[in-house]
Image (tube, helix red, strand yellow):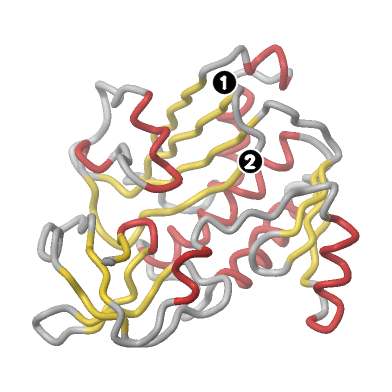
């Protein structure tokens, strides 16, 4: 596993951690998982207060896909590509906005989980463990059929074994709105894909990016409306094949 850190601020002083300490957290969590082909890109930004992660574990990437030029990860182009990056790899990106970072921190994620982190160390550990679950599923063929909720459960179980200080549980459906309203001042919930959730079957989309280059630039049709909280949408390409395409890689055709 190769780990890279990118920042536009003096994060070590603010977070009171060093690169070696953060690297030890990653290695501790990944212990027992084959991460030979994994690259972890960690972004610590002083102008942002949001956080998140994403795993590109289905297809092989090259240095040309290390940066994003559109979508919510567009800021990555502000940083250079590491000179020693492998020729091909799977990628986990983590983003932490430390503008107003204060811990303990309570958040409700897009899947309806209430999560409380005692420190930045715990926050980093949870986001990495969640994305590592996706890497293990798609690259190592583990956790067959499991999705985002299972990734949260696995991350909490794994981190509990390692004595991290994290509390998390899925909010009851009937009380989700009430609980979210109580916590809205603690964490502003932002849906970067809101505009896609009103799409209907037959609407047209443009594929902005395809790691294999087969469908990049192609106009495709929406097969069915996007599911709540999903980050992928089912589309049909010109050859009649159906795909669950990441929303980060498409654009609406007006």
Residue at 47% x, 24% y is 6
Task: Give me the C-alpha separation between circle 2 and circle 1.
Answer: 21 Å
The residue beneath circle 1 is: 19
Q: Is residue 53 left or right of residue 204?
A: right
Above or below residue 181? Residue 15 is: above
Mark positioned earlier in the residue sequence (2 or 1): 1
Above or below residue 23? Residue 175 is: below
Q: In terms of depth relative to the viewer, which is nearer, 251 or 74?
A: 251
The residue beneath circle 2 is: 50
Question: x, y percentage for residue 156?
Answer: 72, 59
For residue 1, what is the image quadrant?
A: top left
Question: x, y percentage for residue 185?
Answer: 85, 48
**Local SS, label 2:** loop
Q: In the rendered view of the protein, which quadrant contains the C terminus?
A: bottom left
Question: x, y percentage for residue 137?
Answer: 44, 67
Q: In terms of depth relative to the viewer, which is nearer, 33 or 207?
A: 207
């Amino acid at each position: 596993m190769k780990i890279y850190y990118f920042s536009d601020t003096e994060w070590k002083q603010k977070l009171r951690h060093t690169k070696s300490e953060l690297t030890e957290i990653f290695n501790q969590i990944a212990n027992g998982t084959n991460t030979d082909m994994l690259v972890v890109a960690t972004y610590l930004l002083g102008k942002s207060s949001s956080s998140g992660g994403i795993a590109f574990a289905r297809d092989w990437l090259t240095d040309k896909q290390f940066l994003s030029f559109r979508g919510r990860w567009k800021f990555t182009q502000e940083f250079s590509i590491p000179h020693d990056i492998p020729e091909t790899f799977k990628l986990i990106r983590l983003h932490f906005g430390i503008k107003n970072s204060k811990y303990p921190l309570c958040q409700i994620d897009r899947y309806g989980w209430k999560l409380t982190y005692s420190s930045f160390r715990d926050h980093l550990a949870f986001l990495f463990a969640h994305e590592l679950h996706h890497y293990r599923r798609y690259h190592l063929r583990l956790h067959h059929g499991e999705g985002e909720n299972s990734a949260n459960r696995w991350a909490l179980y794994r981190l509990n074994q390692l004595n991290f200080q994290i509390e998390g549980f899925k909010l009851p459906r009937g009380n989700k709105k009430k609980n979210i309203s109580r916590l809205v001042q603690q964490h502003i919930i932002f849906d970067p894909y809101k505009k896609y959730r009103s799409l209907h079957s037959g609407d047209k989309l443009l594929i902005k990016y395809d790691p294999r280059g087969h469908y990049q630039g192609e106009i495709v049709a929406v097969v069915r409306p996007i599911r709540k909280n999903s980050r992928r949408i089912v589309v049909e390409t010109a050859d009649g094949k159906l795909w669950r395409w990441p929303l980060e890689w498409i654009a609406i055709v007006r």
